[in-house]
Image (tube, helix red, strand yellow):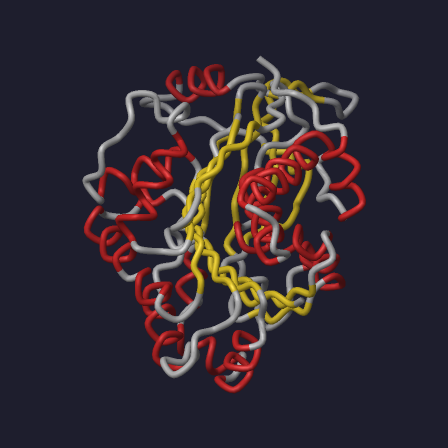
Amino acid sequence: MSSVVGFDGFVDHIIAVVDKRHADGQYDAVPTIAAMGDKIRAAAGESSNYELIVKQSKLGGNGPIMANALARLGLGVTYIGSLGYPEIHPVFRDFSKRARVISVAESGQTDALEFQDGKIMLGKYGTLDDVNWDNLVARVGLDTLRTTFGGATLIGMVNWTMLSGMGSIWRHLLDNVFSTESRHKGTLFIDLADPEKRTPTDLFAALKGLAEFESRINLILGMNLKEALQVASVLKLRIPTDPESDVSELATSIREELEIGCAVIHPRRTAAAATATESAHFQGPFIRHPKISTGAGDHFNAGFCLGRILGLGLAESLCAGVTTSGYYVRSAESPTLTDLADFAATLPGSEG
């Protein structure tokens, strides 16, 4: 089975902010976001300088993280996105050994200032404007797009929010790639990725456009709980009093309103999904102190989609999703299929 995923791509720099510099080359980092805020507030009306230590540079973006997880799970992967142009950025080299990679634009850059109580993400994303239909055709080729998408068992299109050209890409794919004559036999997964940054009008239009994809290919809409509540609000759906407890109801109502094949929602502690014929809920192996959290949702998406294309039931697919994510946040590594099976066999309970 093969997959194609796109279209974003970021280089994530994990950074410590120096609080005190010592003579031996060592330093104390600013410990918390609150402490950093106090420093910035004290500089009002003056000026201030902050030394940044880049601790790690790694691949980032919803698409590359999901695609890398799929490749680790053994799926054949083609990735199309902003991984550096004309040369692929070094952080994507290992990924490019696992997958067929086609880059169409320079990567976005994220400086993640890391503190004990969270991260402040500073992004430089102007290069993502080059992720558009004209560049896809010029740098991939229309025939290649048709054959790559046409032969894929799984198609993933993620991060609509950050890619201003995604709406146009969707329209051109419908017009030029997804045939109206015969229904595609694969599965299309779409993740909007934090649509709070977009206007309600834009979000409503994007959501209503999903039905046209559903008429040509089985569609899954993936959301975390915050995203699901934003979608429900724009669609003017009833929002449950306790959304996390009633997440199955929320998934069902979103799926019915959009008239799509499947809606799946993954809060931190659980996950739920709904199709036209069933709904399911699965408790996740929540951990209080993960080794890594960025990318957990993208790993859930990879595991859930793998379950669906393998023909697993809805509950089993949710299990594959929370297991993939649970393994990743504990180890800071994407699991292989063997890792996934072993972890699922002794799935730990949720902490707290």
Q: Is residue 201 shown above or below 280? A: below
Task: Kindly indicate the quadrant of the structure image that contains residue 67.
Answer: bottom right
Residue extending farthest top: 352
Q: Is residue 75 shown above or below 150? A: above
Say which of 62 and 348 sits in front.
Answer: 348
**In which quadrant is the N terminus drawn?**
bottom right
The residue positioned 61% from the left and 65% from the top of the image is: 3
Task: Kindly indicate the quadrant of the structure image that contains residue 117.
Answer: top right
Q: Position of residue 77 (x, y in %)?
A: 65, 64
Q: Position of residue 215 (x, y in %)?
A: 35, 68
Say which of 147 and 134 sits in front.
Answer: 147
| 190 lies left or right of 89 | left
| 208 lies left or right of 340 | left
Say which of 304 and 287 sits in front.
Answer: 304
Q: Position of residue 177 (x, y in %)?
A: 43, 79
Residue extending farthest front: 277
The residue positioned 56% from the left and 27% from the top of the image is: 283
Task: Kindly indicate the quadrant of the structure image that contains residue 254.
Answer: top left
The residue positioned 35% from the left and 56% from the top of the image is: 260
Residue extending farthest bottom: 143
Instruction: Count how many numbered circles sit on residues in the image.
Output: 0
Q: Position of residue 74 (x, y in %)?
A: 74, 57
Q: Is residue 252 shown above or below 29? A: below
Say which of 170 and 313 sits in front.
Answer: 313
| 141 lies left or right of 212 | right
**In which quadrant is the C terminus drawn?**
top right
